[in-house]
Image (cartoon, coloured by chain):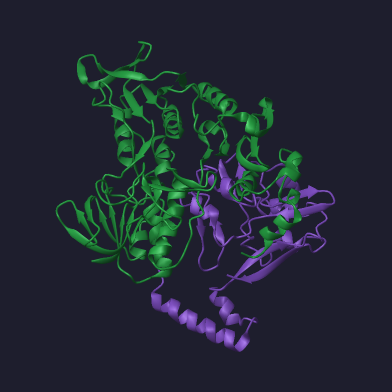
Amino acid sequence: MIHWSVYLFRNVYKRVCWLFYGNRLPYAYRLWGANTMKRVSVKEEACIGCGLCQVYCTVEHSKSKDPIKAYRREQPRPISRVRVETNKPQSISIRCQQCKNTPCVTACLTGAMTLDKETGLVVHDAEKCIGCWTCIMVCPYGAIKPDTLSKIVVKCDLCPDREVPACVANCPNEALVCEEVTQ
Amino acid sequence: MSKYVIIGGSAGGIGAVEAIREVDPVGTLTVISEETVPQYSRPMISEYVSREATLDTMKYRGDQFWKNNNVQTLTGRTATKIDFTKKQVELDGGDKIGYEKLLIATGGKPFVPRMEGGEKDGVFTFTELSSAEGIEAKLEHSKSVVVIGGGLIGVSASEALVKRGITVTLVELKDNILSLILDKTASEIAEKVLTEAGATVITGQTVQRILGKKGNEAAVGGVVMTDGKEIPCDLVVVAIGVIPRTELVKETDMKLNRGIVVDRFMRTNIPDVYACGDVAEAHDFLINGNRLLPLWPLAHLGGQVAGYNMAGKKAEYEGGTVMSSLKYFDLPVIAVGNVNPEDISDYEVLVELKPEKTVYKKILLKDGAIVGFIFLGDLERAGIFFRLLKNHVDVSEIKDMLLSDDFGIVTLPEQLRQEMFVVN
């Protein structure tokens, strides 16, 4: 646990930052990571339902990172953390929205789902997960997927190895945006 | 003297500690727990018995949880009395702790009916680590077990024991197993899966008395069913249900029904005293009233809300309802709300059954809103339905789409969809 004085100092620092920069948060402030977090949002009007986000998500979360191998040879088959829903002419790409009230974290039976206070992200620990599906029951977006082979759940991790998540980087119509939002 | 005192160190107590520390990092905080490992996940004791989890992996929070949150823990201690006027909790051994804010999160205890032979060696319950350890110690010399109660705990116990190669007989008094959670169709599928896995399911009957072993009357040797039939077994697991542990506050001014009655802020009728979890009767958003709901996620949520309010941050409990997800015997099921109404004519029922894929979906609507659903086999979008049910959303316009494979957030009316993607 971080000492309470650090919280206090951070708060003062935050106020000073706002005073000088307003919305344009300085790098040092972001580096501290206490107040902004990444989030992927979708522009409904730009989504054409091509499903490439699903493909790139699957590949990114495969062992080989190669589309053909990932789809045809890899066992267990990697699972996309993204779902494209279509209701013509509308389509939309769904993934974990990193809710602030974190229903999945509260409901988790084992402590596998946690909220990282530093980054504001909801993190899933595959080692602790027993696949009880409780998080799936309470996720308002239906964004947590059951991996029926490994008997655990999977969810969007915002591609930790990449600066911009794979789905966003490869969206042909720029319907997906990765934004920094204040926590 | 401690600013915050919490009786109970399981889901509710832990939720409260986290919430209090979010608001007040310095106020003194004491947790009283009867168990010596207070932070383990109770639903995982079936994993412990089946040897899929160890004591270490079944911890709900890390070893340093209490230390990191600056909590004084009194483990292996029992609170024996609460003096609401002096604001003191009395412990076994006579120690007294004063409090400013008190949370009662004592949980529930397994209900064990009086039964001839119930005191014999080899009769266990299945809600605590100590009982799991007791079963574990006996398993080596046991071949068969009778599980009394075909609810969630009974089925989870059966799964664990089947996985350990024990012959399991599951006994349920009602006509179907999991009758509080599932409807007849889903329950029959579950029963089939259990039978295929090697368990024997007996419904419509219960155990009349427990017999002793030949040559050792003190140990379990078998059971006698209501119809007089004898089933030999080495162990008996009683999993009929849990009842709130209200003994601490009996004969006080505290408002009790079956559990401690709390409002939407988890407050009891006594100032500065809160309650949550299996011991409390809290809000149910479906019936819009108070109800006992002994479920782990709701205990944690209630603890969080109580913690915020204790530390001075106003928080409202959104409530829960009958909500279960099952994974036992590799049969994924999510069932929420009222799926077995007494008078079906008031409801509109949407059903999809694909036996070849073991997929069954049922949605019950009343006055245009979802009041219950069962998803068996295909769970992925169940959470969307849970939200619609919780918020009493009128779905009559999109009714025809609900069971379609294309159903999703995209199917929801535009306004609802917009609401969901507003940064919250």
Colour given to chain A in the rendered image:
purple
Q: Nearer the viewer, residue B329 or B9?
A: B9
Q: Quadrant of residue B345?
A: top right
Residue farthest to the bottom, as pictured: A20
Residue at horizontal 18 percent and vertical 51 percent from the top? B92
Question: Residue B282 location in percent, x, y?
Answer: 44, 49
Residue at horizontal 35 percent and vertical 38 percent from the top? B243
Callout count: 0
Question: Residue B196 location in percent, x, y?
Answer: 53, 22
Residue farthest to the right, as pictured: A89
- Residue A48 visible in the snapshot: yes
Q: Quadrant of residue B370?
A: top right
Q: Is residue B204 above or below residue B352?
A: above
Question: Residue A93 location in percent, x, y?
Answer: 73, 54
Q: Quadrant of the N terminus of chain B?
A: bottom left
Residue at horizontal 60 percent and vertical 60 percent from the top? A98
Q: Quadrant of the C terminus of chain B?
A: bottom right
Residue farthest to the left, as pictured: B94
Task: Answer with left or right where residue B52 lies relative to residue B371.
Answer: left
Q: Tell me which chain appears green.
A: B
Task: Answer with left or right where residue B256 lies relative to residue B417.
Answer: left
Question: Residue B65 location in percent, x, y?
Answer: 37, 59
- Residue A56 visible in the snapshot: no
